[in-house]
Amino acid sequence: REVDFEIVSEPMLSLFSFRHKAASDTDADEHNLRLVNAINDDGRIYLTQTKVDGRVAIRFQVGQFDATAEDVDAAFTAITEIARAVA
């Protein structure tokens, strides 16, 4: 199954927020909190949560001046693998 994400904020420099669309009718806020916690528990990357329009979202920022495209790809891989497991 393909993993579904939605971007929920316009990028500001290297920061944007997204949500994962749950596979079932589970509570979207609860689902995204579980996802961000699972991502952080995994240990490959660390993300934070926020609220956009009153709903839980996950913040992604590449703040390192020496970050590479490979770093961003690795983060995306971690996020999608964990989202599949949590879905």
Image (tube, rainbow, N blue to C red):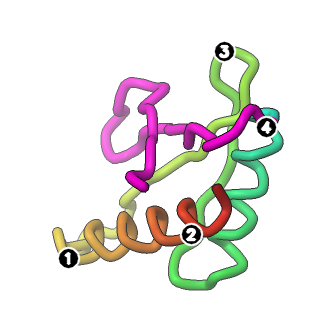
- Identify the residue position indicated by label 4 in the image: 26
Q: CA distance from mark 2 to mark 3?
A: 25 Å
Cα separation between marks 4 and 3: 19 Å
Give the residue drawn at x 35%, y 32%. 11
Question: Which amino acid, mark 2?
Answer: Ile
Label 2 sits on residue: 82
Quadrant location of the N terminus in the rendered image: bottom left
Tag 3 residue: 53
User: Does the magenta run of residues contain 65?
Assistant: no
* Residue type marked 3: Asp
Where does the magenta region start and end?
1-26
- Closer to the eye: label 1 or 4: 4
At 63% from the left and 41% from the top, the residue drawn is 22
Residue reaching furthest to the bottom: 43
Q: Between tags 2 and 3, which lies in front?
A: 2
Q: Quadrant of residue 23?
A: top right
